[in-house]
Image (spheres, rainbow, N blue to C red):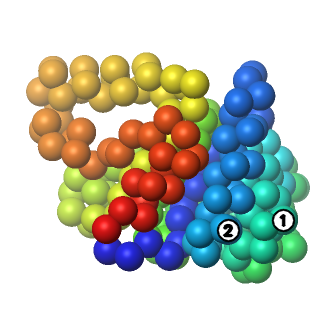
Amino acid sequence: MSVKSVCVYCGSRSGAMPAYTQAAQVLGKSLADAGLRLVYGAGDVGLMGEVARAAQAAGGETFGVIPEHLVRREVGKSDLTTYVVTETMHERKKVMLMNADAVVVLPGGPGSLDELFEVLTWRQLGLHDKPIVILNVDGYWDKLRDLLDHVVDQGFADASLADFIIWAATPAETLDKLLKP
């Protein structure tokens, strides 16, 4: 599968560590430099804003999707290449995934986890076969990795669940894994 468009799930907050912001900025620039379109939640706050502004500054194409009720809260970034306002969160997630060839998960909170688990579940059910890369900035997602191993160990998911996630430590490693033939 050739990757041309990457959906990035990440926090609407910046988080406690400067490394999270730096990774979002480097990822946004790297996507643009590689000619990949950024698909994301259309917010101009937190890591969402960082990844989008970095992609834009590097001349990248940006596709943002935001539900109407979050336009003010997440400061809808309407200067994107494509800016879509949906009615619901469910519609937002569907439009984002349908317009991407791969998913990257930066640090984030419950919303990012919701998005990750939905695409992971859809992958497990055979509804898509898009790569899912977790960008584990400074070990942020280590406990998630432990939890997923626990879910498999306890018999609530097949061991193949691990095959649906690609782990990366840096934006450069993320791009390498997305673009490898």
From the viewer's side, name the closer residue of 122 and 101. Answer: 101
Asked if 130 appears above or below 121 in the picture, the reply is below
The residue to which callout 1 is attached is 57
Residue 110 in percent (x, y) is at 57, 35
Asked if 164 appears above or below 138 in the picture, the reply is below
Asked whether the residues under the numbered discs 1 and 2 touch, taking CB atoms below 8 Å apart as contact, a structural biologist would say: yes
102 left or right, relative to 35 = left
Asked if 163 appears above or below 64 in the picture, the reply is above
Q: Which residue lies at the image location 78% right of the left edge and 67% below the top edge?
A: 58
From the viewer's side, name the closer residue of 171 and 162. Answer: 171
Q: Which residue lies at the image location 44% right of the left edge and 22% below the top edge?
A: 142
74 left or right, relative to 1 = right
Mark 1 residue crowding within 10 angstroms, few (<14) / some (14–19) / many (20+): few
Say which quarter of the image contains residue 157: top left
Q: Amino acid at mark 1?
A: Ala
Residue 91 in percent (x, y) is at 55, 67
Q: Of helix, strand and loop, which one carries label 2? A: helix
Residue 135 in percent (x, y) is at 51, 40
The residue to which callout 2 is attached is 32
